[in-house]
Amino acid sequence: MNKVSYLTEEGMQKLKAELEHLRGVERPAISRQIAEARDKGDLSENAEYEAAKEAQAMLEIKIARLEDSLANSRILDESMIDVSRVQILNKVKIRNKANSTVNEYVIVSETEADIKKGKISVNTPIAKGLLGKQVGEEVEIVVPSGIINLEILEISR
């Protein structure tokens, strides 16, 4: 059974655009490469042909995964998101209790995660530790580098 993924409208459009690019640009390009390699003669000893066929197989796997991801994705209505407890698509301001640094993250689906933009996957240890918590709560989260203690300062959309 496939897992449902929740996305923003922007995230859904990004996935659709990527799928359209793979189908409309990448797939025809690989088909041309295969045709060109086939025109060069003996296929049993044609490395270009083999490489193009392998690239085609990898592309088809990528397309199938994207199609599956889109089929199992749902758009969340951001206006309906509750901010009383941390949940997906919330913006959470947290303070590291050890060094008093304050960070702000938006908890998003795995496909939308981008740490440079402050978007962390709902599947990360930090997001998992914050989910369901309220402003003022302190949480202890096990991360690869050890244990961090965080205080939730603010939850917003």
Image (cartoon, rainbow, N blue to C red):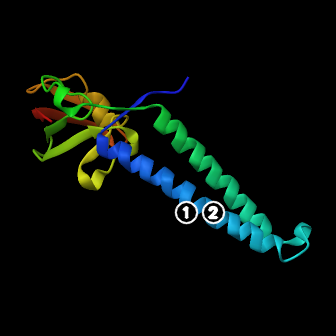
Q: Residue 31 is drawn in which quadrant?
A: bottom right
Q: Nearer the viewer, residue 29 or 113?
A: 29
The image's mark for residue 28 is 2
- What amino acid is found at the position of numbered circle 1 in the picture? Val
> Looking at the figure, which quarter contains the N terminus?
top right
Q: Position of residue 125 (x, y in %)?
A: 34, 35
Residue under the point 39% across and 40% down? 110
- What amino acid is found at the position of numbered circle 2 in the picture? Pro
Vertical position of residue 18 compared to residue 121: above or below: below
Q: Circle 2: is it few (<14), some (14-19), or many (20+) Cα within 10 Å?
A: few
Q: Are marks 1 and 2 in contact (CB under 8 Å)?
A: yes
For label 2, the SS is helix
Visible residue check, residue 138: yes
Residue under the point 83% across and 75% down? 39
Vertical position of residue 83 compared to residue 112: above or below: above
Residue lying farthest to the bottom in this orientation: 40
In 3D space, how far apart are the residues under numbered discs 1 and 2 (Cα atoms)?
6 Å
Q: Please give the residue where the numbered disc 1 appears in the rendered image.
A: 25
Residue under the point 59% across and 43% down? 64
Q: Position of residue 24 (x, y in %)?
A: 55, 58
